[in-house]
Amino acid sequence: MTKVTGIAGVLLEMKRIGERTNKAALRQLRREAQIIAEISQEQSPVLEGNLEMSHQIVETIGDGRRVEIAIEVGGEVNGVDVNGYLDFIHEAVYRLGPKSMEKQGRVKRLVGRKFLERARDEREDKIAGAIEAEIQKVL
């Protein structure tokens, strides 16, 4: 890194560092959202696959022009209103159907209730470290 001098140079360099670190953090946060969505899909019960396909990552601009990233599940998929059964499937205690039991035999994670919540919990302690590591790469 080139050493900058003078107040203007230092301020410019600090601005550049801020831009690089913000971009790096956002890039990693997007990766983490994708990982959580994929884990959640893997853990989702399945009948026709609409619940799995209903996962989407949504970015919005929040206060202070901050990018906010959310994983949303639901909506209409293949003409089916997933919202009609989403709360039950995520929150209730039930027996898995035949397709979900078959899926359970193929995947390493538990298929069933709390699929999104468990996916988030699995990554929660790793997110900050992953973002920090990504920021360190650009410094």
Image (tube, rainbow, N blue to C red):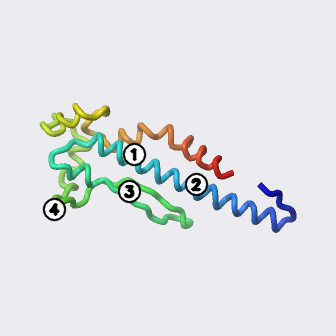
Q: Residue furthest front?
A: 2
Q: CA distance from mark 4 to mark 2?
A: 38 Å
Horizontal and vertical percent for residue 74?
A: 26, 55
Horizontal and vertical percent for residue 62?
A: 49, 64
**Of the residues shown, which amino acid type is indicated by label 2?**
Ala
Which residue is more in the foreground, 107 or 57? 107
Name the residue: 25% across, 49% down: 52
Q: CA distance from mark 4 to mark 1?
A: 25 Å
Q: Tell me the tag on residue 79.
A: 4
- Residue holding disc 2: 24
The crowd level at tag 2 (other Cα within 10 Å; few <14, some 14-19, many 20+) is many
Circle 4: element type: loop
- Residue holding disc 3: 57
Mark with earlier residue (4, 2): 2
Q: CA distance from mark 3 to mark 4?
A: 20 Å
Q: Residue furthest left?
A: 98
- Residue holding disc 1: 36
